[in-house]
Image: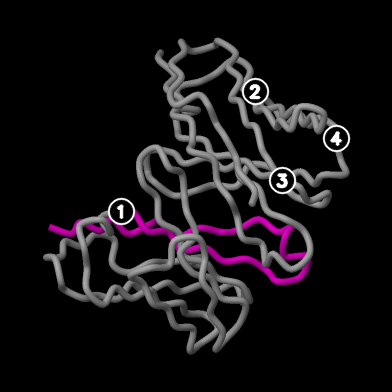
Amino acid sequence: NAGVTQTPKFRVLKTGQSMTLLCAQDMNHEYMYWYRQDPGMGLRLIHYSVGEGTTAKGEVPDGYNVSRLKKQNFLLGLESAAPSQTSVYFCASSFSRDSSYNEQFFGPGTRLTVL
Amino acid sequence: AQKVTQAQTEISVVEKEDVTLDCVYETRDTTYYLFWYKQPPSGELVFLIRRNSFDEQNEISGRYSWNFQKSTSSFNFTITASQVVDSAVYFCALTLGGTSYGKLTFGQGTILTVHP
């Protein structure tokens, strides 16, 4: 099992450019999450999904969109990148049953720099 | 809204010292779950432990131990006889029960450096 994978690992964008981060999991998890990690702020939830075809906003959703067309994939999009979106992005997934109790499995992260 | 505070931004110890990482949480819910994750220099987050709000038993796993005290809203993590491999960022996190869908609220993280 590959677990949770993220593509790409690194990316540099110019302000105003767009991009999509791909997260894939092979554990048949229902729930998937996107977090961003910034120095001194821990991880903050951007968007999450509780199943194929569903998405919901987290704590810091502005400037991001997501899609979950297939159960195993969760895409995070930046339509017009801003320097404030420079961060490390983590995808995570978990089982839905007893969801609050289940630990989340994290991908390796994507380091994004917006110039 | 819930909140998790890790007041120690950075801790530096020498190998074999014991070290305690503090975690204080805030929530009005009676059902919640607490987690600790480790982020080594390689970057990925690794699950260490979870605790539910109804289980105040302390837990020990090898050199790691966790002290959960509802009276002080704390869930502290102690590493005994620290090793260089323990150097990492450690996160405490909280999720609510019910229909929270496992959404985690993280603390700011504590950077632990263990010197040889």
Question: Of tags 3 and 2, which is closer to the observer?
Answer: 3
- Residue at position x 47%, y 50% from top? A43
Which residue bears the numbered disc 1? Answer: A87
Which residue bears the numbered disc 3? Answer: B27
Mark 4 and mark 3 residues within 8 Å of each other at the beta carbon: no
Q: What is the quadrant of residue B49 in the picture?
A: top right
Would residue A3 be visible to someone looking at this image?
Answer: no
Question: Of tags 2 and 1, which is closer to the observer?
Answer: 1
Residues flagged by tags 2 and 1 on a common chain: no
Name the image quarter holding the C terminus of chain A.
bottom left
Residue B78 badge: 2
Distance, label 2 to label 1, CA atoms, is 30 Å
- Residue at position x 45%, y 59% from top? A35
Q: What are the residue bounds of the magenta stretch?
A: A88-115
- In the rendered image, residue A71, in percent from the top left (x then y), is placed at 55, 83
Residues flagged by tags 4 and 3 on a common chain: yes
Distance, label 4 to label 2, CA atoms, is 16 Å
- Amino acid type indicated by mark 2: Thr
User: Dot 4: few (<14), some (14–19), or many (≥20) neighbours within 10 Å?
Assistant: some
- Amino acid type indicated by mark 1: Ser
Tell me the element at label 1.
Answer: strand
- Residue at position x 49%, y 69% from top? A47
User: Dot 3: few (<14), some (14–19), or many (≥20) neighbours within 10 Å?
Assistant: some
Distance, label 1 to label 4, CA atoms, is 36 Å
Q: Is residue A8 left or right of residue B38?
A: left
Would residue A80 be visible to someone looking at this image?
Answer: yes
